[in-house]
Image (cartoon, helix red, strand yellow):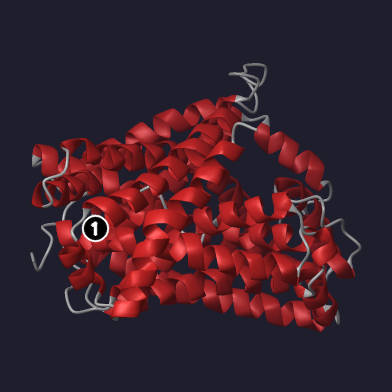
Amino acid sequence: MQSSSRHGMWSSRTAFVLAATGSAVGLGNIWRFPYMTSDNGGGAFVLIYLACIAAVGLPILLAEIMIGRHGRMSPINSLGKVADENKASHGWKGIGWLGIVAGFVILSFYSVVAGWTLHYSWLYLKQLFGGAAITDPGATFGALLANPVELTAWHAVFMVLTLGVVAMGVEKGLERAVKFLMPALFILLLVLVGYGATTGHLGQAASFLFKPDFSEVDGSVFLQAMGQAFFSLSLGMCAMMTYGAYLPNGISIPKIGGMVVLADTGVALLAGLAIFPIVIAFGLDPAGGGPGLIFTSLPLAFNAMSFGIVYGLLFFGLLSMAAWTSSISLLEPATAYLVEKTDMSRKLAAVLVALGCWALGLASVLSFNVWSDVSIFGRGIMDFLEFIANDLMLPLGGMLIAIFAGWFMSRRISRDELDLSDTGYTIWLWLVRVVSPALVLVVLLRAFL
């Protein structure tokens, strides 16, 4: 087994867990998971979600890390190496291409949305030093979307932040960044939860989020839980496969996979306990999920809160950090492949990939203003890119990874890499061969229904 990657190695198990958790934790965790929980039966949804994590998310996560560590290269070349060793078709390298392209497309529009969080962080920072208050959040948000120059500028700032980390390499860039960003993210979350408790509505928020209501559970709730379990772990885009390539031998893949799942879910639950006490205390509508609540409703609450400016700055700073840790893992796979393919320097490879993402992101920027009337198959430009990448490419990639790991990798390799007991290995093999692909296929088909 190759002991190291040409791109560098994580210095410890903790470094990998922080990086992988940073990849998994993103804007969707901070808002989407609490909102979906509250809207789909509370605790009942959480239980279904955890079952889906066990049946779909964790088995595929372990498969991605395993393939990456065994291949020690970018996803495309790792898959090619493993396919060669198992006398399988080189066509399986297509999974790597699918993941890298999906990550490239996702980063192009994800950076635009992350730019919004930077913009609002800046607005609250200015307020802290006497700047104008956000008196009409709807108008403020609308003015941002209508201004392609400002959107482009924040999109560029976020891409530069992401590029700066990836260009520095694994140890000096990725590891150093996540060792700072992830603890800071957790501390910010705990501070916000603590502030939420001062409203007197923490218990009500916990009940609102987590009290089981099985009367709300139907087939669509199961499908949403499966989709959230899959997407929340950054599966199918080969980010975890790339990070796995930098994982030292001798570290238990099942243990670190479990840690990543627990940390990812913990962040999502804490986010709910940070946001919903404020939502309840100020009579906001939790059904107005997504940008409608984050950028237009919550700022109204911040205006009325004690220390609301500080809370707003911390909240949008938290969103920016979560987006940053995810974006690093989106840029890394394509950068690693370009270095391997052309032997160019990491810095140049990262710049070229980042420029490409930024250029494609301009289409998403313009979809809110200049090209707002343009539609592709009935969807706006950014919605179409999101549909193609999130709803089609990621599930397809995840399903193919499960099939490849379960049916085409030799048991000798997968057993050695995972180092599970006989019972544990049998369970993983059954899940990754049958259960995970079948459930992901359901999620994939749902995109067309």
Local packing at callout 1 (Cα closer than 10 Å; few below 14, some 14-19, many 20+) is many
Q: Is residue 82 visible?
A: yes
Where is residue 367? Give x, y as percent.
Answer: 60, 25
Query: 123 or 169: which is nearer to us?
Result: 169
Most extreme residue toward the right is 283
Query: 176 or 329: which is nearer to us?
Result: 329
Q: Is residue 30 left or right of residue 243?
A: right
Query: 37 or 415: which is nearer to us?
Result: 415
Quadrant assignment for the N terminus: bottom left
Where is residue 154? Give x, y as percent.
Answer: 52, 42
Query: 223 or 241: which is nearer to us?
Result: 223
Q: Which residue corresponds to the image point at 60% horizontal and 18% vertical from the top-left?
A: 377
Check the image and report above or below for 378 versus 294.
above
Q: Which residue corresponds to the image point at 32% horizontal and 53% vertical from the top-left?
A: 164
Q: Is residue 62 left or right of residue 6?
A: right
Where is residue 136? Give x, y as percent.
Answer: 83, 46
Dividing the picture into quadrants, the one containing residue 447 is: top right
Badge count: 1
Check the image and report above or below for 171 versus 297.
below
Where is residue 125? Give x, y as percent.
Answer: 63, 60
Quadrant assignment for the C terminus: top right
Dividing the picture into quadrants, the one containing residue 207 is: bottom right
Q: Which residue corresponds to the image point at 18% horizontal and 50% vertical from the top-left?
A: 78
Q: Which residue corresponds to the image point at 76% horizontal and 67% vertical from the top-left?
A: 42
Residue placed under numbered mark 1 in the picture: 67
